[in-house]
């Protein structure tokens, strides 16, 4: 094989690898969003258990999710897929409570993977 042929093969391999990488990273981002939604479901289940034990009341906004920590696995409040803490508000604007993940950027707002994920947007 000549040097030109080797360079062509290396270029083709690099192009194929870049196309695959772009697609895989897109799936990883979507998987993190879905993982965060599943974590929210677990938090909501723990909050319902908490409310059953406290005569129908949910933790106040000032108490936060830590008040319900005993109802989570390992007695720890879960974090979102990016390692950020969930924002818990009670009473919420959309119900008895609101749970929000600030997305990949950890800031309010954003688009795509950086967009906030809300418990009421299911």
Image (cartoon, grey):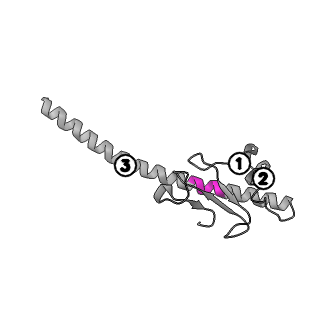
Q: Which of these two is toward me, 60 or 119?
A: 60
Q: Residue at x 81, y 61 (%)?
A: 51
Callout 3 crowding tier (Cα within 10 Å): few <14, some 14–19, many ≥20: few
Q: Distance of mark 2 from mark 1, alpha carbons?
A: 8 Å
Q: Distance of mark 2 from mark 3, alpha carbons?
A: 40 Å
| The N terminus: image quadrant | top left
Name the mark on residue 77: 1
Compare marks 2 and 1 and give the one earlier in the sequence: 2
Q: Which residues are magenta?
A: 35-40
Name the mark on residue 68: 2
Q: Residue at x 67, y 48 (%)?
A: 78
Mark 3 residue element = helix
Q: How many marks?
A: 3
What is the magenta segment's predominant secondary structure? helix
Compare marks 2 and 3 and give the one earlier in the sequence: 3
Q: Are marks 2 and 1 in contact (CB under 8 Å)?
A: yes
Name the mark on residue 22: 3
Mark 2 residue element = helix
- Find out whether residue 37 is within the magenta segment: yes
Q: Position of residue 50 (x, y in %)?
A: 80, 57
- Find out whether residue 110 is within the magenta segment: no
Q: Residue at x 59, y 45 (%)?
A: 83
């Amino acid at each position: 094989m000549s040097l030109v042929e080797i360079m062509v093969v290396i270029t083709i391999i690099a192009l194929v690898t870049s196309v695959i990488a772009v697609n895989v990273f897109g799936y990883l981002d979507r998987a993190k969003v879905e993982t965060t939604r599943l974590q929210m479901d677990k938090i909501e289940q723990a909050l319902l258990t908490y409310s059953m034990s406290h005569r129908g009341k949910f933790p106040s906004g000032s108490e936060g999710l830590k008040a319900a920590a005993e109802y989570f696995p390992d007695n720890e409040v879960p974090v979102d897929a990016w390692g950020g803490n969930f924002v818990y508000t009670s009473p919420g604007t959309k119900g008895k409570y609101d749970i929000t993940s600030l997305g990949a950027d950890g800031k309010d707002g954003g688009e795509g993977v950086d967009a906030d994920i809300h418990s009421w947007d299911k």
